[in-house]
Image (cartoon, helix red, strand yellow):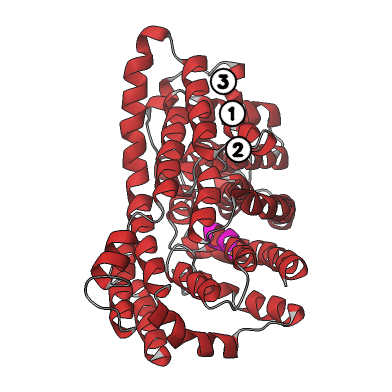
Amino acid sequence: MGVVILLVMAAGVAAMLARKLPTAFALVVLAVVIAFLAGAPLTGKNSVLDTVLQEGAPTLAATMIAIVLGSWLGTLLEETGVAATLVRKIVEFGGDRPVVVALGVLAVSALVGTVTGSAPAAMLAGLIGIPAMIAVGIPKVTAAGTVLMGIAVGIPFELPLWQFFSTALNLPLPTVRGFMVKLFPFALVAAVLYVLVESLRRGVEHTWSLKPAEDKPRSASRREKLSDAPWYALLTPAIPLILALGFELAIVPSLLAGVLYALVTTTVPREMNKRLLRTLYGGFEVAAPPIVLFIAIGILLAAVKLPGTVDALEPLMKAVSPHNAVLFVMVFTLLVPLCLYRGPLNVFGLGAGIAGVLIATGIYPAAAVLGMATSYNQVFGVADPTSTQTVWAAQYAGVSPQEVMVRTLPYVWAVALGGLCVTAATYL
């Protein structure tokens, strides 16, 4: 039966790759089918309806709340002009020095990446940052990749992501935080190297070698009409991180503190009520897609943790999983491409189920699975041509997502290698 379950998982991956089913729907269908194959009854203890669907759906509720708050804060950064001001100041400081401008946009992207992920983060840093980089001669592919690599620098400190891994892998938050801190230097070094190497290797492309201005993506937004935010408001992205990392405050209050700080430092009292509600509703719109996905992931995790599923998959998984530390690093480094194109090792897809199986069967400790999943997530967040942030950044810069993947993949692959080495040395 274990082989049949694996074949069903493979069919689920194929359905997602072929876009026959949206990822969230495919995960739910997959969970129900796995539960029935594992011998789960329709109702009662360890059942399809009561355990997989009813109990699985709210499994990641804490993550969903963190996602809403992060999206709320991201919407505030956009409406108040904080993110745009950060980018403008960096561009003014960089002047006509392409590498300085790119490194500045990289830094801003990292800051907003700690607040919110996916396309919203790319837009916050990229709407002004990408045209500014192109204007000073940074090649278009490098400009798009710079924003994405910057977001990847911020990913280890993205508080909703901490909550996701803590809940999904049943790990204490300090364990997640500790590994993310170890992963951060690899992401930072890779991002800086990307900017330096790609900028110098490809040289400067003068603006007259680009498409005419009217062909560039344009986006008139409320933010473009705002004046610069006050200097003290520019600290907003760092507030939740300082509280959560420096003072070890819980994630929800840390994010709420960021929301309140952004509001107080940018908004006159008579406008606070309207802005709070408007940005909260806007945050819900941004958060809706990931919330649906996290509901589906919770359902899938419940299915793979059923006793019947564990018993069926344990012998197979133990037979193919390397336990030697060197083999662990080699094998899972070679498998990095399987997290691309919504592949089986994408933690926001079937990869979450595989992670659950590895933990439930006792093949690897949960902390080792954390290291593997977060290392792969660094690759997915930058180089996957199907991820929303990669598609947006590439299209806005006027290149294809596949071009961005080719340029960025060697760098984030190295980040994954670093994360896997730390995982093997620490937990195996």
Looking at the image, residue 274 sits to the left or right of residue 212; the answer is left
Mark 1 near mark 2, Cβ–Cβ under 8 Å? Answer: yes
**Which dot marks residue 86?**
1
**Frontmost residue, 236 versus 227:** 236
Q: Main secondary structure of the magenta part?
A: helix
Cα distance between the residues tagged 2 and 3:
13 Å
Of label 2 and label 3, which has the lower sequence position? 2
- Measured in 3D between alpha carbons, the distance from the residue under mark 1 to the one under mark 2, in whole angstroms, is 10 Å
Q: Tell me whether the residue at label 2 lies in contact with that at label 3, contact meaning CB atoms closer than 8 angstroms.
A: no
Residue wearing tag 2? 111
In the depicted view, which residue is nearer to us: 205 or 295? 295
Image quadrant in which the N terminus is located = bottom left
Q: Residue at x 56, y 20 (%)?
A: 233
Q: Secondary structure at mark 3?
A: helix
Dot 3: within a 10 Å radius of its alpha carbon, few (fewer than 14), some, or many (20 or more) residues? many
Amino acid type, label 3: Ala
The residue type indicated by label 2 comes to Leu
Residue drawn at x 58%, y 39% is 135
- The residue type indicated by label 1 comes to Leu
Query: Secondary structure under badge 2?
Result: helix
Q: Position of residue 33 (x, y in %)?
A: 29, 79
- State whether residue 232 appears in this view: yes
- Give the image quarter of residue 6: bottom left
Q: Which stretch is magenta?
A: 376-381
Which numbered disc, 3 or 1, marks the residue closer to the eye?
Answer: 3
377 part of magenta stretch? yes
Residue 151 in picture, x, y percent from top left: 58, 47
Q: What residue sits 44% from the left and 48% below the top? A: 63
Q: Earlier in the sequence, mark 3 or mark 1?
A: 1
**1 or 2: mark nearer the eye:** 2
| Residue 319, magenta (yes or no) | no
